Image (cartoon, helix red, strand yellow):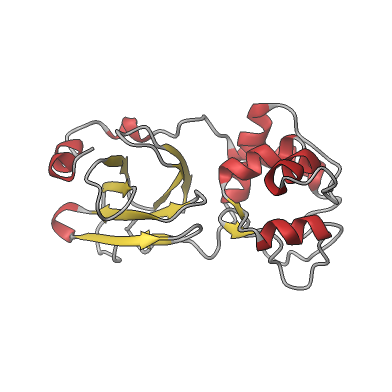
Amino acid sequence: MRRSHIVAVLSLTLSAALPVHAQDAAAGEQIFRKCTSCHQAGAGARNSAGPILTDVVGRAAGSVSGYRYGKSMLAAGEAGLIWNAENIFNYLFNPTEFLRAYLDDPKAKAKMNFSLKAEQDRHDVIAYLSTFQVAKAPPENGFCVTNQSELTHVFAVDAGDEGRKVEELGPGGILCTAASDAPLNGFVSVFESAEHDEGCSRLITAGNIEGMIKYSDFDRCEWTSHAG
C-alpha cells in the first residue's frame, strides 16, 4: 500500500483487522495443560524441565536466564532464531526437525520431544502464550505493532489527529502510540525499508498489539493479533 493511500484505509470497516488465522486463547489454555509438566507461564513462573514461556513470543531462542539449554538450541539462538509466531508454529510440529532445518545440521536435536500436530492446536497455543507478553503491553488507550519476523523493517503507527510514529524495528521490536485520555483507533503499517513506498497496513483498535509475522509487498503480509 502506498503511503499516500494509507488514509483511505481508515474508511474501511474494522472487521478487516481480523487475524489471518482464527486463534482461540481459551482453547489454547486447555491445550497448554499438556505442556505444564515441563513449562510454566505467567505470574510466579519458574524454569522447570523447560524454560519459562512468559513473554516467549518475540524472544530470542536460548535466552532465558538460569535455564540450561541444549547445544542445538543455543546454536540456533546464536544464529539469530527469534520465537515469532511462525517459528513457534513450525517448531511445535516437530522440534528436532525444525532445529535441523534451521541449523542445516542433521545431528541437531531438541530437548523437547513433545509435539502438536494439529494446526489449530498450534495456533490456539500461540494465542494463549501471547497473553503473557508482559513486556509488550500497549499504552493506555493506545495500540502497538511488533516485528515478529526475522528481518528488520520500517514500521508505523498512525492514530489520525493524535499523530504518526515511524521507526525501523529489528526482530522482536515494538512501536506504540502515545498514551491517550480517550481510546485511539487507527492503523499500523510496515515497509520493507525506508526506500520503499509499497507495503502493508492493518486496521487496529485501542488496547491491541498487532504482530507482523512475515513481510510481503502489496498488502500480502501475514499478521497475528492479540489483546494487550
Whether residue 172 sits left or right of residue 138 in the image: it is right
Q: Nearer the viewer, residue 168 or 31?
A: 168
Whether residue 7 sits left or right of residue 175 in the image: it is left
Q: Nearer the viewer, residue 100 or 91?
A: 100
The residue positioned 73% from the left and 34% from the top of the image is: 93
- Tell me which corner region of the image, top left, top right, bottom left or bottom right, holds residue 181: bottom left
Taking the image as drawn, is residue 158 in sight?
yes
Whether residue 38 sits left or right of residue 26 in the image: it is right
Where residue 4 appears, x then y in whole percent?
12, 43
The residue positioned 32% from the left and 40% from the top of the image is: 202
Q: Nearer the viewer, residue 119 or 81?
A: 81
- Tell me which corner region of the image, top left, top right, bottom left or bottom right, holds residue 13: top left
The residue positioned 24% from the left and 53% from the top of the image is: 195
Where residue 220 appears, x then y in whole percent?
37, 32
- Tell me which corner region of the image, top left, top right, bottom left or bottom right, holds residue 10: top left
The residue positioned 33% from the left and 48% from the top of the image is: 190
Image quarter where the N terminus lies is top left
Against 152, is 35 above or below? above
Where residue 31 appears, x then y in whole percent?
73, 37
